[in-house]
Image (tube, helix red, strand yellow):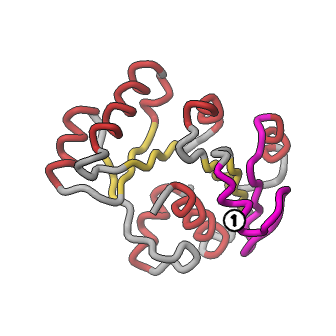
Amino acid sequence: MGVTHLVISLANYSVSHRRRRTAVVELSGNHAIEILKGEGGPFEWNRINCYPNLTRNGIADVINEDYEVIIFDMGSSYYRIRAELLRCDQKLVLGSLTPWRKMEYIRFVLEEMEEDRYARNMIFLTQNGIRKDKKDFKKQVGQPVYPVPYLPEPLLADKSQYEFFDRFLF
């Protein structure tokens, strides 16, 4: 599961269970959201308003719409668009605690916390990692990393996942 998968899962929960008007804004440049329709430009998909490959100039237009929830998919292009993170009420960062990626995740977090004051308001997530790795993360970073439940299908959340979604959607 990657960032876009989590974004679609959160957006679907927002429209399906919370009944909130929700937009997904793709800033990652990976064209994953665009693939859902097969062409560029805004579109609606499963009651989610999607804005694929939006530029910085287009963000203000989306914010001025009457959305209750706007979810930015920044993917791994964070450094290119990190100023947009300031616009977010909830800042979720999904990373990996697999043995071959955990130091990269910890290094990223430490660098951001040292450089940017707003990084301290981030919520760190992972879908993998053993208890020891999660304890090490908290010891090194000073903040916990929260587990993401297994989300095999982003459009079919079950009751066991509701608590996770409710934690991040106001």
Residue 42, horizontal then vertical, whole percent: 83, 58
User: What is the span of residues highlighted in magenta in the rendered image?
Assistant: 30-56
Residue at position x 39%, y 51% in the image: 125
Residue 89, horizontal then vertical, whole percent: 58, 42
Q: Nearer the viewer, residue 31 or 86?
A: 31
One can see residue 86 in this view:
no
Residue at position x 42%, y 72% in the image: 161
Q: Nearer the viewer, residue 89 or 124?
A: 124
- Reading the image, the residue beneath label 1 is 20
Residue lying furthest top: 115
Report the number of discs.
Answer: 1
Residue 167, horizontal then vertical, whole percent: 45, 58
In the rendered image, residue 68 lying in the magenta stretch gets the answer no
Is the residue 34 above or below the residue 125 in the image?
A: below
Is the residue 103 above or below the residue 95 in the image?
A: above
Q: From the image, which quarter does the C terminus lie in?
A: bottom right
The image quadrant of residue 159 is bottom left
